[in-house]
Amino acid sequence: MVGLSLSLVLALGPGGSQVGAPEDGVRFSPPPLEIGYDHYESWNDIWRRFLDRNGRPDLYGPLLQPAPELQRPEYELPLMVAEHPLYLERDWNRRARGARVFIHSDDEFSFFNEVRAKERIPMGRVGALGLRYDRLELREVRSSMFQLAFAFPDIRGTGAFVEIRPVARFEKPDLDIELALGWARPDRGRVQARLFSMDTFNDASDALAVNRDAVQEVRVIHREPAFGLALEGEVFAIRNLRAALYLGGVIPARQSIYYAAPELTDRDREQSALLGGGWFEWAVPRTPLLLGAAATRVDTRQIDHNFDGAVIDWVREHETRAKGFAMVRLDDQLIANFLGSLTIEAVASYRLTQLPEHESEVGTVARDRSWLGLLRANWMPTRVFGVELGYLVLDRAAEGEGELAPFLTQTNHRLSTRFSLAFDPHVWITFGVGWDLDDPDNPYDQGGMTLTARW
């Protein structure tokens, strides 16, 4: 998947946590909002996709599974409307506590929704306990992950840190453990290495099931430990510039799969992935203008052999995202006293998904491309209440076999009207509905709410 976006933010008026970030103010009295972009949450979403195999459409399928057969032509429009503003991303990633939520209509019977919440509690004089919950429910994602973090930040005042992060979940075979270590200084930068142990207790659960004669439709036995590795660096010591680079991969590891159904073929499977990303943001000297860009690329591979060594199946997935942005924020108290606060955001994005041939009742999509544009303005005439108006256009072209690709290939336009509530510096909310500009006989086009909380 490839995405390219340009964002312009103009604000008139006064105005996660990454590992190693300092404790950031007294609880329930957060510091002033730190305006700017950060790509770390998007990078972590890829790893959550890999780790939560129960959150993918096919529990025993490839690592990524974008699943276009589950989508609709306008699928990306409500997701773009529900996204949090770009200028709030840095504050979310730098802080150790907070919450984010969006709820947006999908159809007559279901909502897309996202919940993210995090907290950090001191443990003695050298440690801390972190809590993190991430839930995402979309057409191709049903992920719910709760992660603990046993942290030792700023060891002996050197800036070095270590964190151990087990994932607590209902499915024992899908339990994961993450180890992070690195160095961070608020005024210089941050470097971090992370090791992911995937499905750590899978074989232990299987051994118990076999010993107790428990019925298993599918047995998965790890012949080699499954690990992922990420290397991440961020620099903000250079005047007017912030930049980050991310590299990672899932190390190839073999597992054996046994099916209870006799018509299915038992097999050896090897899964691996390579991924990378980065972003930068430049504060133009003597102006309130911020310019930047971000990108991620993911390549996954899955090879199945029978027990004689012959290849049964070969699956490769490719996803690339990129975006460029510009933000302007003006804090002129005199203007704010008369006009309130105004935010304008313009976004243009490009996405490309490439998949292998796969079975689907409605056909297959091998290549899926979309252009998406957004122009959105948020005016706050008072400190608490405001209105938001947005225009979106999506052009999507899919290539493949069957009826799915022609169904997804459409151009759609939408108008978004929302109200805004700001309880600075704690809570920011927008909520409202969309209007279909292509079908005058059915103008209503989904509604929803987006919320950010700081404490």
Image: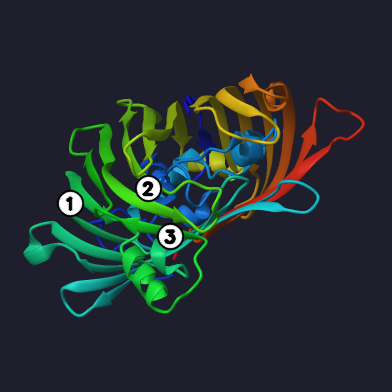
Residue that numbered label 3 is attached to = 219
Residue that numbered label 1 is attached to = 184
- Badge 1 marks a residue whose secondary structure is strand
Quadrant in which the C terminus appears:
bottom left
Q: Is residue 132 left or right of residue 343?
A: left
Q: Based on the displayed image, in which of its 4 quarters is residue 246 positioned? A: top left
The first of marks 3 and 1 along the sequence is 1
10 Å crowding of disc 2: few (<14), some (14-19), many (20+): some
Q: Is residue 393 left or right of residue 305?
A: right
10 Å crowding of disc 1: few (<14), some (14-19), many (20+): many
The first of marks 1 and 2 along the sequence is 2
- Badge 3 marks a residue whose secondary structure is strand
178 or 265, which is in the foreground? Answer: 265
Residue at the location (50% across, 61% down)? 426
273 or 130, which is in the foreground? Answer: 273
Q: Amino acid at mark 1?
A: Ala
| Residue 227 locus on image (x, y percent) | 26, 51
- Badge 2 marks a residue whose secondary structure is helix
